[in-house]
Image: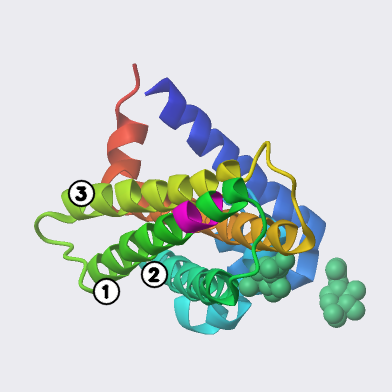
Amino acid sequence: MTILALFLALLISTLLHNVVVHGENYSYVNEACSVTRYQDLCVKSLSSYSNNAKRSPSRWARAGVSVTLSEVKSVSQYVNTMTSGGHMRGTRNRAALADCVECIQDALNNLHKSLGVLKRLNNNGGFNEQMNDVLTWLSAALTNQDTCINGFEGGRKNKEITSLCDKVQNASYITSNALALALVNKLASTGLQHYLGANP
Ligand SMILES: *[C@@H]1O[C@H](CO)[C@@H](O)[C@H](O)[C@H]1NC(C)=O
Ligand SMILES: *[C@@H]1O[C@H](CO)[C@@H](O)[C@H](O)[C@H]1NC(C)=O
């Protein structure tokens, strides 16, 4: 309860802060992104959804996962060209790269499953369970990407690996933002009144 109360207090204070700082330019996307950790990236990657999503937490959650999926797809293409190039030096880096390919594939699967559920979210029954699944899969996708990056630690990094890790890192920031948007969707639809009413 306390953590949720803190989360809500933080949510409300960031919201107010953003209204004050951004003034007249404060828009739906700023509002939605105010709960995310990487706000600039969030606004940049999601601004095109603003008119459609407005104040709908479920649409923002879907948009967040949708842009994450395309970002991770592009990472996947990049890492695949690296493996097919065959000029990766060092056994250690080759092994890390092979692991990374697998991790990114797992991340893609987790994101596909999440988007599938968000597209047919059911507000009547099973919503809570569906959102718990989505949160679990998004966290897993985040872990998949961290695992890829950590695999290269300790090895000698060349330019290609550094660039790959930057891309994966960027995708993981976007995933983290999507996770925050999904959490808000869960709280907004199921918990808010319940948690606000349940004072310890
Ligand atoms: C709002 O955006 C316009 C155009 O981008 C800019 O000129 C203006 O300074 C902004 N206002 C605030 C309060 O940030
Ligand atoms: C990070 O993601 C954003 C949004 O998709 C993109 O514009 C930017 O080029 C990416 N940066 C890197 C280093 O991949």
Measure how far apart labels 2 and 1 are at the Cα level.
7 Å
Ligand 1: image quarter: bottom right
On the image, the x and y values in percent for residue 102 come to 40, 58
Residue flagged by tag 2: what amino acid is it?
Arg
Residue count near mark 2 (Cα–Cα under 10 Å), binned few <14, some 14–19, many ≥20: many
Instruction: Kindly identify which residue carries mark 2.
Output: 62
Amino acid at the residue labelled 1: Lys
| Number of numbered callouts drawn | 3
| Residue name at image x 54 percent, y 56 percent | 97
Distance of label 3 from label 1 (alpha carbons): 15 Å
Q: Position of residue 119 (x, y in %)?
A: 27, 74
Q: Quadrant of residue 154?
A: top right
For residue 113, side relative to residue 45 (left or right): left
Q: Is mark 3 within 8 Å of ligand 2?
A: no
Q: Residue at x 25, y 47 (%)?
A: 132
Q: Residue 128 shows which numbered tag?
A: 3
Q: Which residues are magenta?
A: 96-100
Q: Quadrant of the C terminus?
A: top left
